[in-house]
Image (cartoon, grey):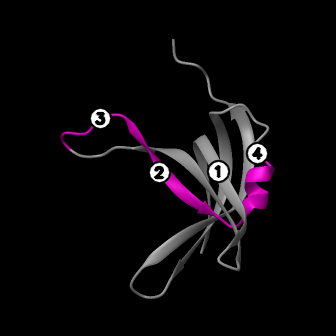
Amino acid sequence: MEMIARVTVRGAKFFRGAIEGKDLDSGKIYVDVDLKGENSFGVCTQELKCEGSKLIDGIKHNPFPFIAEVTMVEKSNGKESTKVVTGIKPLQREAKVA
């Protein structure tokens, strides 16, 4: 299933290289998520896995944080589901809070 979400991207990281002879290409973004619950307030940051490091290469020049439209694919094996970011389209820099 493919979905599109508008998120605040707080940070990103990637790795491209080899570990123990195995080639790896990965990326992650960190986005704001609302806290829920009777004793929770505000937001926290959630890690989202990316399809690869190229997605991070495409956004690393942006001043962080920024608002982006993120395309994700959700897959399931019947027990667990995972979301993988397949596209990141920066929209605007997030306004500073005074």
In percent of width and height, residue 91 lies at 73, 39
Q: Is residue 64 magenta?
A: no
Q: Closest to the observer: 77 or 28?
A: 28
Residue contact between numbered discs 1 and 4, judged by CB atoms under 8 Å: no
Q: Closest to the observer: 38 or 23?
A: 23
In the image, residue 16 sits, relative to residue 76, either above or below, namely above
Q: Residue at x 79, y 38 (%)?
A: 61
- Which residue is under mark 1? 13
- Which residue is under mark 4? 59
Image quadrant assignment for residue 67: top right
| Residue type at numbered disc 4 | Ile
Q: Residues within 10 Å of mark 2 (few under 14, many from 20)?
A: some
Q: Report the mark closest to the observer, 4 or 3.
A: 4
Q: Which residues are magenta?
A: 38-58
How far apart in space, not on screen, are marks 1 and 3 (Cα)? 27 Å
- Which residue is under mark 2? 46
| Residue type at numbered disc 2 | Gln
Q: Residue at x 19, y 39 (%)?
A: 39
| Residue type at numbered disc 3 | Phe
